[in-house]
Structures are given as C-alpha cells and as structure tokens.
Image (tube, grey):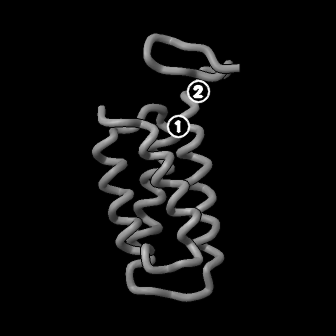
C-alpha cells in the first residue's frame, strides 16, 4: 500500500518506491552485465557506476545530478551492447522517476 507524505510517496515499510525501483533496475542490469560473456573496454566503468547507483538507491533519496552522471557513464560504456539495452532502459526510466530536483 502506498501513501503520501508531502510530495513523496512511501510504502508501508517507509521506503520510497522510486528508490526501490532504481535498486531493482540496477540489480537487474548488474546481473546481466556480469553474465555477458564479451569483455569490452569500458566494462569496469559501467560496473563502478552501477555500484554507485546501487549505493544511492540503498541510501533512500539519491542526488539526482549524481544519478544522471552515473547513468550517462553507464550508457556510454555499454550503450552499444544490444543485449544490455533493456536493462539500461529500465535504469534510465528509474532515474527519470526522480525528476528535476
């Protein structure tokens, strides 16, 4: 059940559903990246920035500009890997839910 607290919606557990969505999307993409058999030059950058996004999601309400920077770095690192496109799109959607704060 979701309820409103000011401008922010929270679950019964007190968790911001946007942060939960971000955490789930990042976890999915991290799993897909780990399972991807092909090595590529910027894989380490993608892994580092996904770890940073996961930490921000765990922290509750992440800093939007920092999330967007991480998203751009991840997209630049893995954007050409078509097998990861759906996972990347899910992360992008989750970041966009935080708006322009």
Q: Where is residue 24? Give x, y as percent.
A: 62, 48
Query: Are there few (<14), some (14-19), or many (20+) residues within 10 Å of tag 2?
Result: some
Side (left or right) of 80 relative to 76: right
Asked if 75 appears above or below 25 in the picture, the reply is below
Q: Residue at x 64, y 66 (%)?
A: 31
Q: Residue at x 41, y 61 (%)?
A: 49
Q: Which residue is mark 2?
A: 15
Q: Which mark is residue 87?
A: none
Q: Where is residue 81? Give x, y as percent.
A: 50, 79
Q: Residue lying at the far right in this picture: please name it.
A: 1
Q: Residue at x 60, y 20 (%)?
A: 14
Location of the C terminus by quadrant is top left
**Secondary structure of the residue carrying numbered label 1:** helix
Query: Are there few (<14), some (14-19), or many (20+) residues within 10 Å of tag 1?
Result: many
The quadrant where residue 20 appears: top right
Q: Which residue is mark 1?
A: 19
Q: CA distance from mark 2 to mark 1?
A: 7 Å
| Residue 94 or residue 57, whichever sits in front | 94
Q: Where is residue 56? Give x, y as percent.
A: 44, 43
The answer to whether the residue labelled 2 contacts the one labelled 1, judged by CB atoms less than 8 Å apart, is yes
The quadrant where residue 17 appears: top right
**Secondary structure of the residue carrying numbered label 2:** loop
| Residue 34 or residue 1, whichever sits in front | 1
Q: Residue at x 65, y 76 (%)?
A: 35
Q: Where is residue 76? Give x, y as percent.
A: 35, 71
């Amino acid at each position: 059940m979701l309820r409103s607290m000011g401008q922010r919606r929270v679950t019964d557990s007190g968790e911001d559903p946007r942060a939960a969505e971000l955490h789930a999307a990042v976890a999915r993409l991290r799993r897909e990246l780990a399972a991807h058999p092909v090595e590529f030059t910027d894989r380490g950058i993608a892994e580092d920035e996904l770890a940073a996004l996961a930490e921000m999601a765990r922290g509750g309400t992440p800093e939007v500009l920092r999330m967007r920077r991480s998203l751009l770095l991840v997209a630049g690192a893995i954007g050409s890997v078509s097998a990861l496109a759906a996972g990347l799109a899910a992360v992008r959607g989750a970041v966009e839910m935080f708006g322009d704060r």
